[in-house]
Image: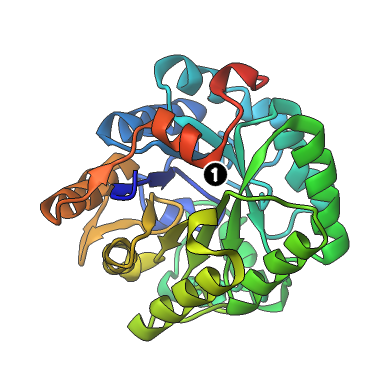
Amino acid sequence: MANKVIISCAVTGSIHTPTMSLYLPFAPEDIARQAIEAAEAGAAILHFHARDPKTGEPNGDPATYLQFLPAVKAATDAVINITTGGGLTMTLDQRLAPALQFKPELASFNMGSINFSIHRSARRYSQWKYDWEEPYLKGTEGNIFRNTFVDMKRVLKELGEGCGTRFEYECYDLGHLYNLAYLLDEKLVEPPFFLQSVFGILGGMGTEVELLSYVRATADRLFGRENYQWSVIGPGRHQMRIGTLGALLGGSVRVGLEDSLWLRKGDLAKSSADQVRKIRGILEELSFEIATPDEVRSMLHLKGADQVAI
């Protein structure tokens, strides 16, 4: 499967707000529809957050996830990946609650704390659809997304050991790779790893081409290329460029309206599936093959869709 590229799709996230795009899904039926369309377009992994169905505010209540996860599971064979990042202001208990209840095959897992700030996006708007949006965005300037080593060990114990869930290790900075290496040294994690490198978030790594190569080389040195699958995220306008560069370096890619609202400059994506189709077309033109959900299960040693509590 050396030439197989995994396409992950993050359908809604907790960063963008309804004012930014009328296509951002937050009603359960819209999240389910866009997820199913993304799987049909070629996404092997579907990554989920939940939102208040009336206002679009990030929501960590497992009951909200229940309004769309069963429909997605019934309609696709994609790997369901539930966030443990939740929303930027949620506690660890709130962030873990959905994944602990549904015991997914895969869950996102931030490899450290970060000054994750999206406050600058509030400057682009003078009117808002909902009252929560502006203070939520502006408040991130003073927010720390916390994931200490104590927090990480709890996630590994309760969700990894307790539920058989494996992880998408999200690395927003070079030091996050070394945090994972520490957990490996402590024998708290084992390969194969699914590394997701995020380039372009304020508080994390930039988007320079040379940085992608260095991150890839660092992961090779720390883990050995045979022991991990590497994927990349390029938020906003960087999405397609970073994804293509990552594939050319032997990696996989994540797209979706969590990471970017755009299909191209000046053109809002009407669905996450639009972005999946676009990156798939680019990859196939470059002679890459797209991994199926079952191939991903084999590559990442996942427990199988029949072992989740959805």
Specify the amino acid type for callout 1. Gly
- Rendered view: 297 above or below 270: above
Q: Is residue 140 left or right of residue 264?
A: right
Q: Is residue 307 left or right of residue 162?
A: left
Q: Quadrant of the N terminus?
A: top left
Q: Quadrant of the C terminus?
A: top right
Q: Is residue 64 left or right of residue 11?
A: right
The picture places residue 51, in percent across and down from the top left corner, at 58, 40
Residue 256: tell me if it is visible. Answer: yes
Q: Residue at x 54, y 64 (%)?
A: 224
Rendering quarter of residue 33 = top left
The picture places residue 103, in percent across and down from the top left corner, at 70, 29
What is the total number of numbered labels drawn onto the structure image?
1
Residue 200: tell me if it is visible. Answer: no
The picture places residue 11, in percent across and down from the top left corner, at 44, 43
- Rendered view: 150 above or below 106: below
Q: Residue at x 41, y 73 (%)?
A: 124
Tell me the element at label 1: loop
- Rendered view: 122 above or below 186: below
Colouring used for the render: rainbow
The picture places residue 107, in percent across and down from the top left corner, at 62, 43
Q: Residue at x 27, y 50 (%)?
A: 269
In depth, the one of 13 and 295 nearer the eye is: 295
Q: Which residue is mark 1?
A: 56
Residue at the left extreme, as displayed: 285
* Dot 1 crowding, Cα within 10 Å, few <14, some 14–19, many 20+: many
- Rendered view: 201 above or below 299: below
